[in-house]
Image (cartoon, grey):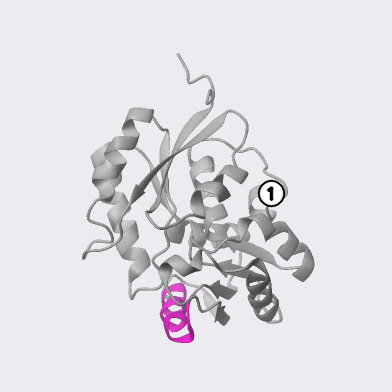
Amino acid sequence: MVDTLAPRAVIGVMTPAMNTVVQPELELLRPAGVTNQMQRFRLGGDDVSDDLNDEAEKLLDCVPKAIAIGLTTDAGPGGPPKLASKCQRLEKEISLPVFNASSADYAALQALGAKRIAVVTPFNAEVDQVVKANTEAAGFEVVTIKGTEAPSLPAICETSLDDIRAVFAEVAKSDCDAILQVGTALPVVAILQELEDTHGKTIVACNAAVYWQCLRGVGITDPIPGYGRLLAEF
């Protein structure tokens, strides 16, 4: 027997409890025959989250093919490797593929053949330097970086689309191969195609990247047009 609404796959989606952006953005990208089933967790502790594994176990009742974690940890020193390690341990515990947005960003840039990267963040200039260091540690050259300077994590979800457009316009002036957007609470997916068309630059938006990697990881290769080159062509 297969799930009536999800004959191809149930995708488990996890996001920090305060994040109101991941769920609607991934719904925009959902191909036919796939459903996304949500679970939330709290950030904190020395290991990214103290309750991530417990919350993931609850998703197993939905029988997902994989779990996509809508979180980037680029704002903390060594954050992406910490998140990757956390996800690897979770994979072993639940015997399912687990994807995260930081690792997916890097995989997407590699798939696109992008080396020189402009970066958009929701952070201030000080935190942007940490993001820059993490991106360069992953093997990319950051030619410019700019944030929307949200005053708090919850406020990232409240960033206006015009403010987001302005930051993309600024970094798009650089000689970059692609633009990377980190921070899964920053609402970019709905205007992703618009931004690519306006600036003539390929954009890796973190929420699109983690869903792309998750779908491809479970064998769903449908082109998803209207949300940027990554989902449409790779």
Q: Does the magenta stretch include residue 54?
A: no
Q: Is residue 88 left or right of residue 108?
A: left
Left or right: residue 223 compared with residue 182:
right
Looking at the image, residue 64 lies above or below residue 90: above
Whole-percent x, y for residue 116 in the image: 60, 75
Is residue 96 visible to us here?
A: yes
- Picture coordinates of residue 139, whole percent (x, y): 47, 72
Could you tell me which residue is drawn at 74 percent across and 61 percent down? 194
Q: Quadrant of residue 222?
A: top right
Residue that appears at 35% across and 73% down? 76
Does residue 125 show up magenta in the picture?
A: yes
Q: What stretch is highlighted in magenta?
A: 123-136
Q: Is 158 or 187 nearer to us in this picture?
A: 158
Q: Residues within 10 Å of mark 1 (few under 14, many from 20)?
A: few
Answer with the quarter of the image where residue 205 lies.
bottom right
Q: Name the residue under label 1.
A: 233
- In the rendered structure, the answer to whether residue 88 lies left or right of residue 234 reads left
Residue 59 rendering spot, x and y as whole percentages: 34, 36
- The three-letter amino acid code for the residue at tag 1 is Glu
Q: Helix, strand, or loop for circle 1? A: helix
Relative to residue 65, is residue 113 depicted above or below?
A: below
